[in-house]
Amino acid sequence: MATFDAPRLSGRRSPMNESLRADFRHLRCSGAFWSLRAVDERAQNFSVRKNVPQPPATSADRGAMLTVYADGGCGYAATSDLSGPGLQAALDRASAWARASAARSLIDFRALPHVAPRGEYASPEADARPWSRSEWYDLLAAESRDAGLDSRIVDWEASVETRVAEHAYLTSAGGEVVQRYRFVMPNLSVSAHADGDTQTRTLNGYRGLAQQGGESILERFGFSGSGRRIADEALQLLGAPNCPQGRMDVLLMPDQMILQIHESIGHPLELDRILGDERNFAGTSFVTLDMFGTYRYGSELLNVSFDPTRAEELASYGFDDDGAPAERMYLIRRGILERPLGGTISQARAQIPGVANARADGWNRPPIDRMANLNIEPGDADLDAMIAGIEHGVLMATNSSWSIDDSRNKFQFGCEWGQLIEQGRLTTVVKNPNYRGISANFWRSLAQVGDAATVKVLGTPYCGKGEPSQLIRVGHASPACVFTAVDVFGGDN
């Protein structure tokens, strides 16, 4: 039996990690390599609906996953018992699974590196004083009061979700990583109704306004005062005509672009999906392994980066959950597909390079290939010039619906807000704007990419994938973009 003497890092200590270090030193395993990944995460949810404060919701989740490479196989076992005996029992189960699966493994785990990452990561404002419960309720109540400004406003809610998490990763090869996260995700939703029609307007979509860091996100996105603005826009939609039907140019704002990126670039490029792992649950991909390096995914204006190093973005980190160091990588450059979203294990299976994106949504799930921060790089187009260059089109903002086929190719998306563009000018507000297309063709119609002034850093905390299911945080930064000859339709088409 081998034992491991864990190294120590300088810096901030937590009782959980101090105890884990001590216990990890005394774990016994006959495998070639083993690791421990521990997660301690706490969340709070506050909301005020129709001027009535709702009961707060709080949660805490804490546990560890033990992973073992033995005899060419890999096994893992999770436990909420973080005592020394509890960790040893999970390690023993993982060892047994590794040996039992070795003869049927897709790869020989003896060929994988015995990683020894060392480092720390912390979200911006990770150590800043969090707001008190009363401070949050005061802010949310003020926005709620401002949103209920008209008898046609039938429902409205201001809410926020905050999370703090600490992840520790220790390996038998000498690796030790501590990563501390803080997330703030505010939202505001207003529904207006009249004459049998209901229109809902939100602040950047459902939890789209999501970043790492603290309460400074509120100032960056103008949360204060948003209640009245969002309510006014809901009323404008109520009186607006339906979006017209036909082929036209479409100017997608960043809060819709993040959905377009997520569904028709992010998911199709996940390497385990390309290899068939998601077939029974969330489908496959139109992308195949032979496309990398040659396939024209979009126009020459399309540059897509995987960037877990952008500090404020929702899915930034220093190391993925298999210990690979975070690096910014191009997935698509000048429209050509270069690299998939595949972590260490998928790269070994496919024999192509990927990225550091093996991620789990908690301590009791194994890491799988996931999007992290998937961004479109800004171009050089000014927003006013983009609008001025469109003779007949529509601006669309804030996703409201999505549908895409099992291969992540043919899609149909809807938005909350639309505004016609006629002869280079924004004109009539329209409701129920929708568009459809095929991923393989849609991105090739990309005609203009907004400059840095049009970029917003947004995300979603609820990206679903895997069996058993995992919900994970994903970040997207995008400028506004123009697409030509898009199939557009409204709610009555």
Image (cartoon, rainbow, N blue to C red):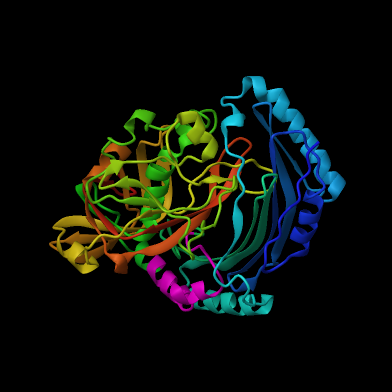
Q: Is residue 383 above or below residue 336?
A: below
Task: Decide if residue 90 is on the left or right side of residue 227.
Answer: right
In the image, residue 471 lies at what x, y percent? 58, 47
Looking at the image, which is closer to me, 83 or 238? 83
Q: Quadrant of the N terminus?
A: top right
Q: Answer yes or no: is residue 205 visible.
A: no
| Res 72 quadrant in image | top right
**Residue at x-position 83% and y-position 39%:** 89
Looking at the image, which is closer to me, 73 or 124? 73
- The number of discs equals 0
**Residue at x-position 67% and y-position 49%:** 174
Residue with the most extreme top position:
103
Q: Quadrant of the C terminus?
A: top left
Looking at the image, which is closer to me, 163 or 149? 163
Determine if the magenta segment contains residue 134.
no
Q: Is residue 35 above or below residue 123?
A: above
In the image, residue 433 lies at what x, y percent? 32, 53
Residue with the most extreme right position:
85
In the image, residue 327 lies at what x, y percent? 46, 53
In the image, residue 130 lies at what x, y percent? 64, 75
Magenta range: 208-234
Q: Answer yes or no: is residue 448 visible.
A: yes
Task: Decide if residue 462 is on the left or right side of residue 485.
Answer: right
| Res 221 quadrant in image | bottom left
Determine if the magenta segment contains residue 213.
yes
**Residue at x-position 48% and y-position 61%:** 313
